[in-house]
Amino acid sequence: MGLFDATRITVAFAIVYSTALFLQIVTKQRVIIQHKNSNKPFDRYTSPSLRHVDRLVGNMIEWALVFLPLLWCLAVCDRLDTVAVRSSWMYVFCRAVYVILVMVHGVASSGRNKMLWISTLPAYGCLIVLMVKAVPLLWVET
């Protein structure tokens, strides 16, 4: 386990992220066409359809900045063991489920998105596992 596993996991994450971007682009184009056909002014920031996909992509970016450094810290330090690899794959799976859940259920403006917890809470658990393994590597000499 090591760099090859981290590379595969990163590519899988990139595919999930690219799917979210693709959905954002498709949704935006659909909403623009709907507005043109109805002669309504288009404002992406007040469109409920775009709010969902914009939050989806934003959330993917926000958490990528936590996940990917932890994964690569473990890989570069040759500490990407079975638990870390499985946690990383589970994290990518949870992110894929998150994409589906947002597209089906949307994102509540209140922030209370109980359906999204199905993927969000296990994803947080995966990140905690990676943090517990990675953070000490940066400050504890081995």
Image (spheres, rainbow, N blue to C red):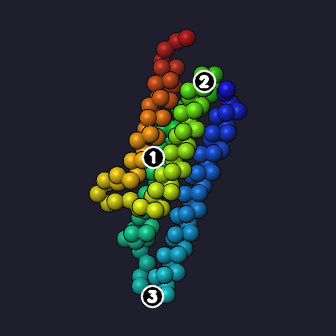
Q: x, y (%) of residue 32?
A: 50, 77
- Residue at position x 50%, y 23% from top? 133
Proximity of marks 2 and 3: CB atoms separated by less than 8 Å:
no
| Front residue of 98 and 27 | 98
Between the residue at mark 2 and the residue at mark 3, the CA separation in whole angstroms equals 56 Å
| Of callouts 1 and 2, the N-terminal one | 2
| Of callouts 2 and 3, the N-terminal one | 3
Tell me the quarter of the picture where residue 111 sits.
bottom left
Residue 73: tell me if it is visible.
no
Q: Is residue 7 above or below residue 103?
A: above
On the rendered structure, is 74 left or right of 125? right
Q: Dot 2: what SS?
A: loop
| Of callouts 3 and 1, the N-terminal one | 3
Which of the two discs, 1 and 2, sits closer to the camera? 1
Local crowd size for mark 3, using a 10 Å CA cut-off: few (<14), some (14–19), many (≥20): few
**Please, what is the three-letter code of the amino acid marked with disc 2?**
Asp
Q: Is residue 4 above or below residue 103?
A: above
Proximity of marks 3 and 1: CB atoms separated by less than 8 Å:
no
Residue 81: which disc? 2
- Residue at position x 56%, y 59% from top? 21
Q: Which residue does the numbered mark 3 point to in the structure image?
A: 38
Quadrant showing the N terminus: top right
Q: Is residue 119 above or below residue 78?
A: below
**Please, what is the three-letter code of the amino acid marked with disc 3?**
Ser
Between the residue at mark 3 and the residue at mark 1, the CA separation in whole angstroms equals 37 Å
On the rendered structure, is 4 left or right of 96? right
